[in-house]
Every structure is written in C-alpha cells, then in structure tokens.
Image: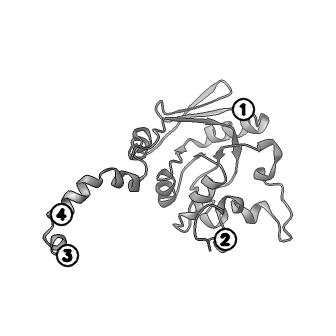
Amino acid sequence: MSLAKITSYSGRAVPVPGDDIDTDRIIPARFMKCVTFDGLGKYLFNDVRFDANGAKTAHNLNDARFSGAKIIVSGRNFGCGSSREHAPQAIYHAGFRAVIAEGYAEIFFGNSTQLGIPCVSVSHADRLAIEAAVSADPTLEVTIDIAAKEIRFGGKAVALEMRESARSALMSGRWDPLADLLSAQDKVDALSAALPYMAAR
C-alpha cells in the first residue's frame, strides 16, 4: 500500500510556548475513554484552553487570529510524559499536520511520524524567530522543507533537524509500519506457508 510521500509541508502556524509540554496536557487522560481516535481533536490542550467553568482562556489555540493554523510551534521536550498514542492522534484530529519544536520525547516523536506528522527540530533562537514572525502576522505561510532541511517564513530560512530514519520514511512514503507490512502481504503469506508449525494448523 503506497502512502503519500511527505517531502514538505506549508501552512499557517500557531505558537504553543513552553518547555516539557507533556502528553497529559496535550490530551488529558479522562478523554481517552474512546473506541476510536476520531473525536479527540476537540479536547486538544483542553485543560489550558478552558478554565474550571468551561470558559475559554487566552490560549493561542482559542485566538481567532490563529484559526486555520496547521503547524504547532513549541519549545523543548515536546510530548514528554506518558507514551499515550492519543497525544499525536489528538493533534492530527484537531487538524494539525506538523510540529516545529526545539526537541521531542522519543515515543511521541515515533508515534507522530507513524501518523505522517513531521516533527522537526530547530534551535532556541530560530524557534523564537518563527514564533515572533507568526505572532506578528498569523496569516504568514510557513514551509517545512524536509528534503532541503530548512524552514522558510517571511522571506527567511532557518535550518531544521530531523532523525534521518524518520526523514527517510516520510520522504519515501513508508512512514506507517502497518501499511508497510500490508504492502508485503505476498511475502508474509509465503513465509507463513514455509513455517512447519503454520502448515500443521
């Protein structure tokens, strides 16, 4: 099964400032009682987007200026905490398709890559520059060029870093291991048939 080759992504961005933003902040545990991931998007960052009475806070994700943003910009160690797959799923189902941060928790990074969400890293100074640019002009288009290893915005370009295995998987369209396995069904069947304990069943 061939998947889309993700070599670049362009869209508007929203700053979600802070370091060590954990998966419980991204999607609180009480919203994980679901059969599918489809409805998780509306609970993204729920406990910082709404107060105890359910009223909207001043969080950037509630700011109409950033409506339609598809890229999250954040700080160090994004997605730390528990290994819940629900965190990148909530990001995906809320409509976001990429994350720019200074760094990521290992499992969050892997889960995001397997959803086709590029998680690219930049320096602290470059992250602040991107945040400042999109805060000044929320309509600004940001391009994450995975092939060229750079991010372009407002006439500027900064370098990005990404683990080569993830970069290669995205660019080759082999970022979903299940789809990769299903694409080799004939090989799976052949190997299964050759195993004595399978043939005896």
Give the secondary structure at mark 3.
Answer: loop
Kind of residue at disc 3: Arg
Residue 91: x %, y % from top left: 62, 55
Give me the C-alpha separation between circle 2 and circle 4. 43 Å
Q: Residue at left 29%, top 51%?
A: 184
Q: Earlier in the sequence, mark 3 or mark 1?
A: 1
Asked if disc 1 and disc 2 are in contact, CB closer than 8 Å, the reply is no
Give me the C-alpha separation between circle 4 and circle 1. 55 Å
Give the secondary structure at mark 2.
Answer: helix
Packing grade of label 4 (10 A; few <14, some 14-19, many >=20) is few
Q: Which residue is mark 3?
A: 201
Q: Which mark is residue 193?
A: 4
Asked if disc 2 and disc 4 are in contact, CB closer than 8 Å, the reply is no
Q: Which residue is mark 1?
A: 140
Kind of residue at disc 4: Ala
Q: Earlier in the sequence, mark 4 or mark 1?
A: 1
Q: Earlier in the sequence, mark 2 or mark 4?
A: 2
Kind of residue at disc 1: Leu
Q: Residue at left 77%, top 50%?
A: 60
Against 38, is 172 above or below? above
Q: Residue at left 39%, top 47%?
A: 1
Camera-side mark, 2 or 4? 4
For the view shown, which residue lies furthest in the top direction?
Answer: 155
Give me the C-alpha separation between circle 3 and circle 1. 60 Å
Give me the C-alpha separation between circle 4 and circle 3. 11 Å
Camera-side mark, 3 or 1? 3
